[in-house]
Image (cartoon, grey):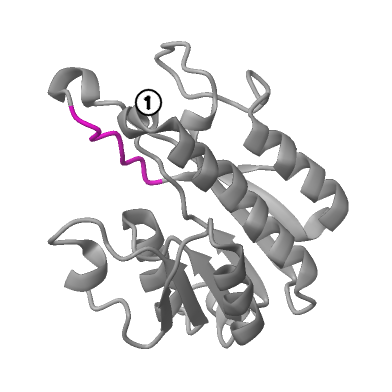
Amino acid sequence: MPHPFVDFYRGKRVLVTGHTGFTGGWLVAWLKLLGAKVFGYGLPPATRPNLFDANLLDRGITSMFGDVRDRNALANAFAEFQPEIVIHYAAQSLEQRSQRDPVETFATNVMGTVHVLEEARLTSSVRALVVVSGDQCYENRDWFWGFSRDEDSRSHRARWKRHRRRRLGPRSTDTRHCSRHHSRATGRDSRRLCGAALISRA
């Protein structure tokens, strides 16, 4: 029995930012199986080995190495591919790194997201936009359970997404990955994974 998403995604032009990362790479693999036409835009893989290279994810897609902070390069990618669906995964998601280099983190996670949202708004082919975020974008209150938007949605990124949802209407949504925190035990940023993506409809 075919996957229920096959009929929807088959032949669709889907632009994925952050396609060289772990979760973005898995999304690309899934979209390829569903028959989507995938355009990946992201930085070169940061580690060796990595999922992107190990699974030859660049085969069967259009892959472009680029930075979401580079508005011109991102605009060229949108203009070249004319996506119907945009899924924004690109982010600096490591909390310890964000504390060491907050300027880079804000530039990537806030302005990078703004660039993606703006290019999606300006590209007439775009029919749907999904912005994926981790719960690290909320204030860390050391709770055992995950965060929800209702508990703390004051981040700049959340504010901008709400603003763009008002402009784009039902074409725009965002998802939040649940993270499991292991770093207190290991001293490293080994925070993921939790398999489900939580859909926010607010």
Mark 1: few, some, or many residues within 10 Å (few <14, many ≥20)? few
In which quadrant is the C terminus drawn? Answer: top right
| Residue occupied by mark 1 | 99
Where is residue 53 shown, x and y percent of the image? 21, 72
Relative to 188, 109 lies left or right: right
Give the vertical position of 50 relative to 55 (above or below).
above
Compared across the picture, whether 156 is left or right of 108 comes to right
* Residue 193 among those drawn in magenta: yes
Q: Residue at x 14, y 24 (%)?
A: 186
Kind of residue sitting beneath label 1: Gln
Residue 150 location, quadrant: top right
Q: How many marks?
A: 1
Residue 35, position in %: x, y? Answer: 48, 84
As helix, strand or loop, the secondary structure at mark 1 comes to: helix
Query: In the image, 131: left or right of 28?
Result: right
Up-down: is 196 above or below 3? above
Whether residue 92 appears in this view of the structure is yes
User: Is 175 one of the magenta-colored residues?
Assistant: no
Q: Give the magenta range.
A: 188-195
Q: Is residue 201 above or below residue 102?
A: below
Query: On the rendered image, what quadrant is the N terminus found in?
Result: bottom left
* Most common secondary structure along the magenta stretch: loop
Q: Residue at x 58, y 46 (%)?
A: 175
